[in-house]
Image (cartoon, helix red, strand yellow):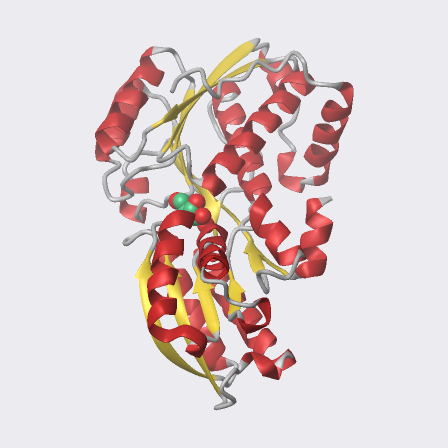
Amino acid sequence: MRGCWRQRKEEQSVKKYLAGLAVCLAAGWLAGCGDAEKKEIHNIKIGVTVYDQYDTFVSQLMERFNDYASSKEEQTGTAIGVDVYNAAGSQLNQNSQVEKMISDGCSVVCVNLVDRTEPASIIDLAEKHRVPVIFFNRELVEEDLERWDQLYYVGAKALESGIMEGELAAEAFRERPQTDKNGDGIIQYMILEGEAGHQDAVVRTEYAVSTIVEKGIEVEKLGYAIANWNRAQAQSKMTQMYGEYGDQIELVLANNDDMALGAIDALQAAGVARENWPVILGIDGTDAGLEAVRDGRMAGTVYNDKEGQAKAMLELAFQLSTEGTPGRLELEDGKYIRLPYAKIGPEEAGELMK
Ligand code: GAL
């Protein structure tokens, strides 16, 4: 995988540079811009390993990361090499990739853990070679992050996404009473859940449902299936559930947009007329997810700020590589950067797509 995503940034346009600079200035915590010149570091190398390069959200986050690296390079004059590896679902693979990145001279490694309960080998290796690690998107437990003072985490506030998805569901039912297809005043729903044991999956499901109930709406669970964040798996699970419950399903709560889109694929393949579709909600605001919200195929999504996360990761990696500390970046407990989510309806989706 090495090299496939590795990007040299020389060809970036002035326009892109200015856009990057504007974003940089807009964010208060980015006060570290330009510090590299002081240290006269002329090039750095950042290693990244992702749990699965075909995960839509993670791959879009990496695109943004590479874009920010380009802007930062132009803005500071420090050459930034980014080596991206795909762990392809194997923790052992990922451990060896980290070893390789360290022996290749990466000044910091960014790790999207395959198994968030198994960071020990990576942490030991990094500590031995004094190379800081930024874990991202797949959150390890606090005790693991405490194992060494050069470990960081960049992600989002999982709980918030569940609450917002629940609020979107409650709003849809209050604003459009026809979504209660059988008129019994109860929402019959089903869940498409991400990976078992992933911090976002469990928390999103729990808080989405409890929020609807807190809003005073009664709910009844018809079905539940794990579809591993994956569109094709979600389509097949939705096909089964639609076969069993058909029009009784009034709401599909998907833990991410790809699975919401998989549910739509299933309804389309089954020839279900659009006016009979249940309310479908996702999380992420991926490109395809935003398009579906703008077109009304999905009732809404919750924006998982990939730009904010990518930028935070890049800035932190840059600071650590050039200064050896997070500098003036704002970190919770000196270790965490967690970006907020945002609710997205058709209007916001249209705006974001611009
Ligand atoms: C979540 C995201 C999912 C998937 C997962 C991978 O935050 O919402 O779509 O990318 O991370 O860890």
Classify residue 78 as left or right of residue 337: right
Q: Position of residue 288 (x, y in %)?
A: 57, 47
Residue at the outermost front position: 271
* Percent coordinates x, y for residue 269 in the rendering: 46, 57
155 and 286: which is toward the camera: 286
State the residue at coordinates (49%, 86%).
182
Say above or below: 87 vs 118. Answer: above
Left or right of residue 212: residue 354: right
Q: Quadrant of residue 92?
A: top left
Q: Is residue 54 visible?
A: yes
Disc tally is 0
Locate the N terminus and report the quarter of the image it occupies: top left
Q: Position of residue 257 (x, y in %)?
A: 50, 53
Quadrant of the rendered structure where residue 96 is? top left
Which quadrant holds the C terminus? Answer: top right
The residue depicted at 30 percent of the width and 48 percent of the height is 141
Relative placement, left or right, of 285 versus 125 is right
Residue at x-position 25% and y-position 26%? 93
Q: Is residue 307 left or right of residue 94?
A: right
From this view, report whether residue 18 is shown above or below residue 224: above
- Residue 333 appears in view: no
The residue nearer to you, when weighing 8 against 73, is 8
Residue 347: x and y in percent read 72, 59
- In the image, residue 209 above or below residue 134: below
| Residue at the bottom extreme of this rendering | 184
Q: What residue is shown at x 67% (from left), y 13% (from top)?
A: 11
